[in-house]
Amino acid sequence: MDLDHEALVAFAKSFGLFYLIALSIGVLIYACWPANRRRFDRAARSVLDDEGGPWR
Amino acid sequence: MVAQLTQFERRLALIIAGLMALCGLVLAAFGHRDPIGVHGLIILAAAIGTMFVVISGSFADVPDDSHLGRYYDDPIKVGVVLAMGWAVFAMAVGDWVAWLLAYPEMTFDAAWSGFGRLRPMHTTGIIFGFGGNALIATSFHVMQRTSRARMPDQLSPWFVLLGYNLFCILAVTGYPMGITQSKEYAEPEWYADIWLVIVWVVYLALYLRTLARRQEPHIYVANWYYLAFILVVAVLHIVNNLAMPIALASAKSFPIFAGVQDAMTQWWYGHNAVAFFLTAGFLGMMYYYLPTRSGRPIFSYRLSIISFWGITFFYMWAGSHHLHYTALPHWVQTLGMTFSAMLLVPSWASAGNALLTLNGAWHKVRDDATLRFMMVAAVFYGLSTFEGSFMAIRPVNSLSHYTDWTVAHVHAGALGWVALITFGAIYALVPILWKRQGMYSSALVEVHFWLALAGTLVYVFAMWNSGLVQGLMWRTYSASGTLAYSFVESLVAMHPYYIARAVGGLLFLSGAVVGCINIWMTARHAPGTAQDAVRDRPLVILASRSLEPGE
């Protein structure tokens, strides 16, 4: 295949669209997955008290 | 600082400094007919100075294992001081060029003092000197605290911090000599760029090695933002600085791209420098210091993840909005415009998330100027991302581009968002680092806050007015179809705004000076924490140390 401007534009306009949509859906699923709630809540609270010293 | 290093690290530091001295000597010797020779001498002097410090510190006892039970904060302290030093220097230069625009005769007829050479000293000093040092220092703090892990070694944080500052010095000293690639925010020449790549790789490795030592399975979201900053800036820096030096003993190089490709690469870099240097890293700062200072977990952790990926995906495509109405293909301009408009969603998600976190803590915002710095920063983040999306729309850009409106936008972001969140983070960090009950004077923090806010507002409103007047004067036609105003007439109309801008900058600069005094007094004179007093008693140390895991 000749890698000219037209070919790159066609690739960017097709593949580019779908991979961005797929990534967005993936991120939304990860962020909203119910099982992740506990882990996220824990992480959000963990920064409030972290000056005690390293665990190692 | 050397006393904390192990014997192996001290030797390695000497070897690195020795190699650098050699590089500096070679550049100075072969480049003595070129400005690169001066930079060779600067590198040589920095390396020899480092060797002196390391050798004179080498007689101190090697630290025992007790320090491994504490976080490694010495480089963070130095980083905070360096950031404030750069802030005062670069804001002073910025205010100087602001007065220069109002009174152009102030160049003393010298080449080095022209606007074209002073302005990059201001932008580099602020973005890389102030912003970069603040990002490195706070990232060292955040990565250790969120991972509950000490940095894996004592040498690489110093290499990153001091090596990075050497890059900044090479950049800022090069401009008055006329060394520049003429690329916005990427002015330093090829040899400084190569050095920054080395420093940056060590920085990334240090961050990942610290994260690898964490106990918690989940990595707190602030680290994601810092990592995006480090990783993407590395990619941007390498691609945009691909260049061929005209000789190995010459500072001059030429980029490998040409024409519109070069322009597109430059603005892909330029806008992502705004996105990943001036936004992602500072969002990391906000997601850590705002919750810790207000004592409340972030309003929605999920939203912070969604906006993180939104910002990383969308910003990559927005750079072409800097090239509206140019030789760039029309569809690429439209792509940049569309992604810029879409960016409003993750940007406002972050700003809203920060402000909603403060629900239930607004009395603290009223009483605590440190937290107020962060709150106002979040407001300015929301304002300037809205403005940015708006200005990226092609017809709006036809009015705003090449006018002072752009300058207003940049400074609403740089002063209102980046500098305010940094000052907030530094005021939260300094008492922790120096183990004080609080800042030396909360009244001085209050003074700094109001000076900074007043300075920002004066500056931004002056430039908004100036930009709109300028843009409208350039496109006003007379009844006969000719331009109603000459360029010089628009220049004369700018004069009062330029004076107002310089006054606003002066207010902001004086705030930073007040901050420096306050930080210095905190480090020197403020009362220590109760915890610190307890540490003086050996029995309690034993008792408290036995509680620490990993010992």
Image: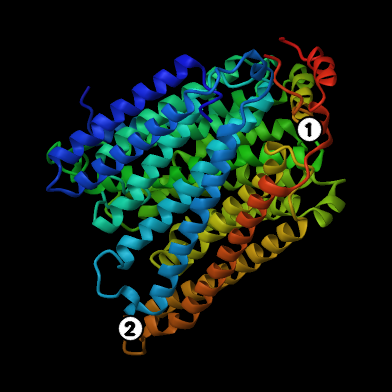
Whether residue B421 is visible to the viewer of this picture, yes or no, is: yes
Give the label on residue B425, or none.
Answer: none
Q: Which residue is mark 2?
A: B488
Q: Position of residue B218 (x, y in %)?
A: 68, 19
Q: Which residue is mark 1?
A: B532
Q: Position of residue B299 (x, y in %)?
A: 78, 38
Q: Position of residue B163 (x, y in %)?
A: 40, 35
Circle 2 — which element?
helix
Are the residues at dot 2 and dot 1 in contact (C-beta closer than 8 Å)? Answer: no
**Which residue is farthest top?**
B551
Mark 2: few, some, or many residues within 10 Å (few <14, many ≥20)?
few
Q: Is residue B551 left or right of residue B478?
A: right
Is B63 or B349 nearer to us in this picture?
A: B63
Q: Chain of mark 1?
A: B
Q: Of discs 2 and 1, which sits in the foreground?
A: 1
Q: Does B86 sit above or below residue B314?
A: below
Co-location on one chain, circles 2 and 1:
yes
Is B217 or A22 nearer to us in this picture?
A: B217
Whether residue A9 is visible to the viewer of this picture, yes or no, is: no
Mark 1: few, some, or many residues within 10 Å (few <14, many ≥20)?
some
Circle 1 — which element?
helix
Residue at horizontal 51%, vertical 27%? B2
Which kind of residue does numbered mark 2 sit on? Val
What scheme was used to colour the molecule? rainbow
As measured in the structure, the alpha-carbon distance from the residue carrying label 2 to the one carrying label 1 is 64 Å
Which kind of residue does numbered mark 1 sit on? Asp
Residue at horizontal 71%, vertical 46%? B352
* Residue B400 falls in image quadrant: bottom left
Q: Is residue B298 left or right of residue B503?
A: right
Q: Position of residue B325 (x, y in %)?
A: 33, 58
Q: State the quadrant of the N terminus of chain A.
A: top left
Residue at horizontal 68%, vertical 27%? B145
